[in-house]
Image (cartoon, coloured by chain):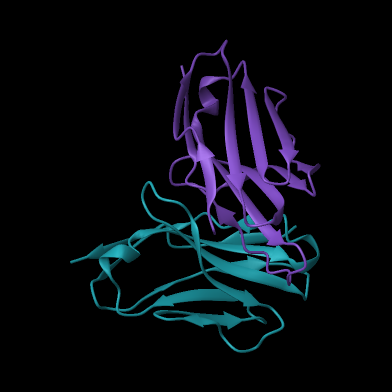
Chain colours: A cyan, B purple
Amino acid sequence: AQTVTQSQPEMSVQEAETVTLSCTYDTSESDYYLFWYKQPPSRQMILVIRQEAYKQQNATENRFSVNFQKAAKSFSLKISDSQLGDAAMYFCAYCRKTSYDKVIFGPGTSLSVIP
Amino acid sequence: DTEVTQTPKHLVMGMTNKKSLKCEQHMGHRAMYWYKQKAKKPPELMFVYSYEKLSINESVPSRFSPECPNSSLLNLHLHALQPEDSALYLCASSQGLGREITGELFFGEGSRLTVL
């Protein structure tokens, strides 16, 4: 069975600094997607970044980038120039390409941004 | 329009009440989902509708009854709930017709349910 692990329940970062959130996953599949979702307090969950397993190049979206290590089954999220609006729960998630409707979420990391 | 709209935002009900949660999307997505989320926990998948047919039921108790009247609407009917069912119920959609499969979920803001 596939699992997603986030070993940091809580993290904090100083405004304008950089923070890295960790995620590891376990799967025997070779073709899958990995995601980072952000859920601010009392607001809707949104996709931050997505990575296809077959693409070796790490995905980037503005201040957000990932370090995808397929062999190590590691998928960390780096947030650069942290802003107060980055404070949220961050969930790492996985799904097989052949069953994209069954997304497996990690337990989440609560990120605080210190002004 | 990239929104998933859920109503009501808040709902308080007794254990003998019958109520419904509603969800609507106009992105042409062919899959719609109900998730249950407890505080500071990840969403737990409850049901998936694909092309208006129930494709996944994660062994959810029968006191939760989903319905998909058409491709844009998703309901969750609630009856005889227990206090432990109090949670945030999230609706999501994905996968536009004819588009590349991306796996991305589009979430609503959720309906916060309290069962007394």
Location of residue A99 with respect to A75 vertically, above or below:
above
Q: Quadrant of the C terminus of chain A?
A: bottom left
Q: Is residue A89 visible?
A: yes
Residue sitting farthest toward the top: B16
> Residue B18 appears in which quarter of the rendering?
top right
What residue is at 60 percent from the left and 82 percent from the top? A69
Location of residue B66 with respect to A100 vertically, above or below:
above
Residue A57 at x, y percent in the picture: 60, 89
> Residue B75 appears in which quarter of the rendering?
top right
Q: Is residue B37 visible?
A: no
What residue is at 58 percent from the left and 81 percent from the top? A68
What residue is at 46 percent from the left and 26 percent from the top? B11
Tally of numbered tags: 0
Residue B46 at x, y percent in the picture: 67, 40
Location of residue A25 with respect to B54 vertically, above or below:
below
Q: Quadrant of the N terminus of chain A?
A: bottom right
Residue B85 at x, y percent in the picture: 55, 27
Q: B26 or B78, which lies in front?
A: B26
